[in-house]
Image (cartoon, rainbow, N blue to C red):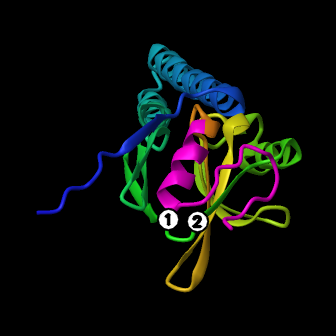
Amino acid sequence: MTTTSPALTFPCSLGGAVARGRKRLRQFLGFLLLLMIGVAISAFYFGRIGGGILALIAAIGPLIALGLVGETDLDVLQLSSGLLIIRLGSGTERIALAGAVPRRLEEEEIRHLERLAGHAGIVAGTGGYDSAQLGVFDLYASNLHNSILIETTIDDEEHRVVVTPDDPAAFLAALAQQNHYPASESRGKTSPP
């Protein structure tokens, strides 16, 4: 009988640019919803039944979007038996950590990430990106100031992921312990010995 060690869990609280972006998105969608309802009421009041119905149908879009905001938010990270388990509002991702090379992102890289993942003041917490500075990577973020880049090789292809645990130092230490190399809290490039 084999026993597996319990998963180490690292919470990921919404904060920084991602939290501000989520708030702006909710405000914008709420405004659109109220605008469409107002247009529908006005159209019905003035006897424009067709226009009122169209406005109500158009209000469905922002209503659905409001319900979906946060579906892909990062909830928690877990380390278990050589796997990084990324729990999102809508599902789970698993990444093998054999030979993983993690490091904290530098302040300049975090600012670059905010610009890359943002548009009109709304910063996405999840997605796939390609940048000259960070390369091709998947982002699973709740607070970009806690960003850790993890490079691993899956099926002879380099895979890069950025995650944001609330306690980056504890996450890096646990990752180092699982992969048997010294932990490094220093910013910048690190690699196992």
> Which numbered marker is on residue 100?
2
- Looking at the image, which residue is at 80% across and 59% down? 189
Give the quadrant of residue 90.
top left
Residues at marks 2 and 1 touching, judged by CB atoms closer than 8 Å: yes
Label 1 sits on a secondary structure element that is loop
Counting from the top left corner in percent of width and height, residue 29 is at 57, 29
Residue 58 visible? no
10 Å neighbourhood of mark 1: few (<14), some, or many (≥20)?
many
- Looking at the image, which residue is at 72% across and 43% down? 185
In the rendered view, tell whether residue 20 sits above or below residue 87. above
Mark 1: amino acid: Leu
Label 2 sits on a secondary structure element that is loop
Image position of 134 (left or right of 79): right
Within the magenta stretch, is there residue 183? Answer: yes
37 and 153: which is toward the camera:
153
Residue 116 visible? yes
Residue closest to the far top: 45
Image position of 2 (left or right of 74): left
Residue closest to the far right: 108
10 Å neighbourhood of mark 2: few (<14), some, or many (≥20)?
many
If the image is split into quadrants, where does the C terminus sit? Answer: bottom right
Counting from the top left corner in percent of width and height, residue 129 is at 68, 61
- Looking at the image, which residue is at 75% across and 59% down? 190
Residue bounds of the magenta highlight: 170-193
